């Protein structure tokens, strides 16, 4: 093989190594929020990037297999070139020349550029990476399977997907975009106050049991009407003596014209007094429930209504706007 052809393949292999190395860095450095924004706009390249990121083992196997194949090709061609001029030191010369070339131009420089321009580069390289993942499918599939198997053996709890952003990371992100002037101070304060819901317990906003207006299972229509008129609530906890039976909606009672109203009693969500408001809200909202019984261990200590939760959230936002 001629010297010119060998040099051509060396250059081509170095460019291939730079491509795969840069692509790997671009994929791992992409801003996921901006990517999701492009996906919402139906950007086809962004959708392809997201599809590739959903299979990280296959993506990494593609870039690593491609990188190593290029390293092998460049080293083999360089050894052949040096064998013509330095037959006794061809291997040493290849190491001394190709290592810094590969490190500086195909790794360090490329990764640095890809790191700072990840959002643009990842859209450009997504198509070629998808193409090479198909061309190199046998090798990619083998190494992807091997890596996944070893990871499952090493990890005692198996492979678990980490959340896209943790609460602390979201707070840090909010601080960053606030410094850049994207968020107004009042907007940042409002968001911070919403996050502070995790620090507020159910016990902090519940109605203590002694102050709760409730129905007793044995009460008649006259007594119920008096309590309903004296209150602005539409739902009441129902007791049988000191035992909590559940809750009842006054509109159900009106519809039944107060006949056999105890049969209308529904179960009530039970929460612990130490539970944070965000957890209480997440338990009430999916079930479309508007009331929870607050317990301290096995002891009923109060009642918490969805209205109390919404009032707490509203007051936080209102105070932030001031």
Image (cartoon, grey):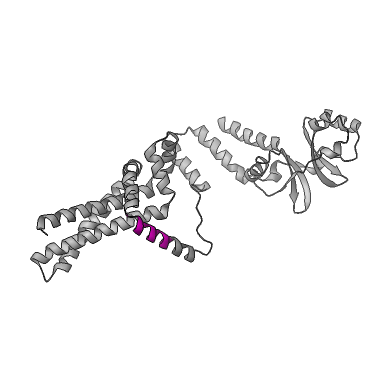
In the picture provided, is 128 more to the left or to the right than 251? left
Q: Quadrant of residue 119?
A: top left
Segment tinted magenta in the rendering: 136-147
Q: Which residue reaches farthest bottom?
A: 88
In the picture provided, is 162 more to the left or to the right than 203? left
Q: Which residue reaches farthest top?
A: 229
Residue sitting nearer the eye, 5 or 199: 5
Residue sitting nearer the eye, 34 or 188: 34
Query: At which x and y percent is residue 296?
Result: 74, 51
In this view of the protein, can residue 111 be seen by the observer? Answer: no
Is 246 placed above or below 258 here?
Answer: below
Q: Residue at x 19, y 63 (%)?
A: 76
Asked whether residue 150 is drawn in magenta, I would say no
In the picture provided, is 82 more to the left or to the right than 194? left
Position of the C terminus, as image quadrant, is top right
Q: Quadrant of residue 137?
A: bottom left
Query: At which x and y percent is residue 48?
Result: 39, 43
In this view of the protein, can residue 137 be seen by the observer? Answer: yes
In the picture provided, is 88 more to the left or to the right than 164? left
Residue sitting nearer the eye, 160 or 283: 160
Of helix, strand and loop, which mostly describes the magenta segment?
helix
Query: At which x and y percent is residue 96?
Result: 18, 64
Query: At which x and y percent is residue 259?
Result: 88, 33
Q: Residue at x 44, y 60 (%)?
A: 148
Asked whether residue 139 is drawn in magenta, I would say yes
Position of the N terminus, as image quadrant, is bottom left
């Amino acid at each position: 093989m001629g010297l010119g052809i060998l040099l051509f393949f060396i250059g081509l292999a170095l460019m291939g190594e730079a491509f795969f190395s840069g692509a790997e860095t671009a994929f791992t450095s992409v801003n996921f929020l901006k990517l999701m924004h492009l996906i919402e706009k139906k950007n086809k390249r962004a959708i392809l990037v997201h599809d590739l990121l959903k299979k990280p083992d296959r993506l990494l196997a593609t870039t690593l297999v491609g990188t190593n194949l290029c390293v092998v090709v460049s080293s083999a061609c360089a050894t052949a070139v040096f064998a013509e001029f330095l037959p006794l030191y061809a291997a040493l010369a290849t190491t001394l020349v190709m290592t810094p070339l590969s490190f500086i131009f195909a790794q360090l420089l490329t990764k640095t550029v890809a790191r700072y321009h990840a959002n643009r580069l990842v859209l450009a390289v997504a198509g070629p990476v998808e193409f090479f993942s198909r061309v190199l499918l046998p090798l990619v599939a083998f190494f992807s399977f091997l890596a996944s198997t070893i990871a499952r053996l090493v990890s005692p709890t198996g492979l678990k997907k980490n959340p896209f952003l943790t609460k602390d990371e979201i707070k840090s992100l909010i601080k960053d975009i606030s410094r850049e002037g994207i968020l107004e101070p009042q907007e940042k304060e409002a968001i911070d106050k919403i996050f502070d819901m995790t620090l507020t317990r159910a016990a902090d906003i519940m109605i203590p049991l002694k102050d709760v207006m409730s129905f007793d299972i044995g009460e008649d229509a006259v007594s119920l009407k008096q309590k309903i008129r004296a209150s602005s609530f539409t739902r009441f906890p129902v007791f049988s003596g000191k035992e909590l039976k559940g809750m009842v909606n006054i509109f159900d009672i009106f519809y039944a014209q107060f006949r056999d109203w105890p049969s209308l009693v529904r179960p009530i969500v039970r929460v612990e007094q130490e539970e944070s408001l965000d957890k209480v809200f997440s338990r009430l909202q999916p079930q479309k429930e508007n009331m929870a019984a607050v317990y301290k261990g096995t002891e009923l200590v109060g009642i918490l209504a969805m209205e109390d939760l919404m009032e707490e959230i509203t007051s936080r936002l209102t105070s932030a706007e001031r």
